[in-house]
């Protein structure tokens, strides 16, 4: 099985100007090589048949993706309308500023099949393409952000995958994201 970083994931996980809330201590090429030479600890089923999650022990100093929202840090939450790419519509997002999370124990790599990526207009020359990565304390998937579920349901034309909204999964995600937020340096 071969794995490559998609251009979408490359710009998010390895931005031109490195940030403290992205993957640390390795280049995009080293990350891709590691995924192809080290078997995951576990493989989790994704939200659709074309999605798999490979759980790896964190071999970097990458920090956890989320921080719990508490009374003593709630005032550090920020929000804005942002798009992940020029082609997507901006959506409301929120994050912490001035908070740093602990070093993650696991990197959970989100993979899409080559067939799905071709359907989305992003063909790859491999079996699987990395579309994202979760940095976590536990070897479990974080719930997809509710807005990402909605974007996916909108379809490929709007930057989604075309997978219909699952109400129960959406409500579980709301319960998690109501009490947690991403962070930015």
Image (spheres, rainbow, N blue to C red):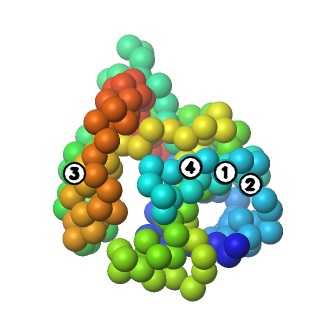
The residue most toward the front is: 49
35 lies above or below 29: above
Front residue of 7/162: it is 162
What residue is pinned by disc 2? 40
- Disc 2 from disc 1: Cα separation: 7 Å
Front residue of 72/37: it is 37
Q: Tell me, for residue 91, which label it has, or none.
A: 3
- Disc 1 from disc 3: Cα separation: 30 Å
* Mark with earlier residue (3, 2): 2
Q: Secondary structure at mark 4?
A: strand
Q: Secondary structure at mark 3?
A: strand
177 lies above or below 62: above
- Disc 2 from disc 4: Cα separation: 13 Å
Front residue of 47/100: it is 47
Taking the spot 43% from the left edge, 71% from the top edge, the residue there is 116
Residue neighbourhood size for the residue with mark 3, other residues' Cα within 10 Å, grouped as few (<14), some (14–19), many (≥20): few
């Amino acid at each position: 099985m071969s794995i490559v970083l998609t251009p979408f994931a490359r710009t998010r996980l390895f931005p031109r100007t490195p940030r403290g809330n992205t993957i640390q201590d390795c280049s995009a090429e080293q990350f891709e090589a590691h995924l192809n030479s080290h078997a995951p600890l576990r493989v989790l089923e994704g939200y659709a048949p074309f999605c798999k999650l490979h759980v790896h022990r964190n071999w970097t100093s990458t920090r956890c993706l989320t921080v719990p929202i508490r009374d003593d840090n709630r005032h550090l939450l920020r929000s804005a309308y942002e798009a992940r790419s020029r082609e997507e519509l901006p959506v409301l997002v929120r994050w912490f500023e001035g908070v740093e999370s602990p070093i993650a124990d696991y990197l959970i790599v989100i993979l899409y099949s080559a067939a799905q990526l071709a359907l989305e207009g992003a063909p790859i020359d491999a079996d699987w393409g990395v579309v994202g990565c979760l940095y976590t304390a536990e070897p479990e998937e974080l719930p997809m952000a509710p807005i990402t579920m909605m974007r996916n349901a909108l379809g490929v034309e709007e930057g989604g995958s075309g997978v219909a909204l699952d109400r129960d999964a959406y409500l579980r995600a709301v319960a998690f994201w109501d009490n947690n937020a991403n962070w930015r340096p």
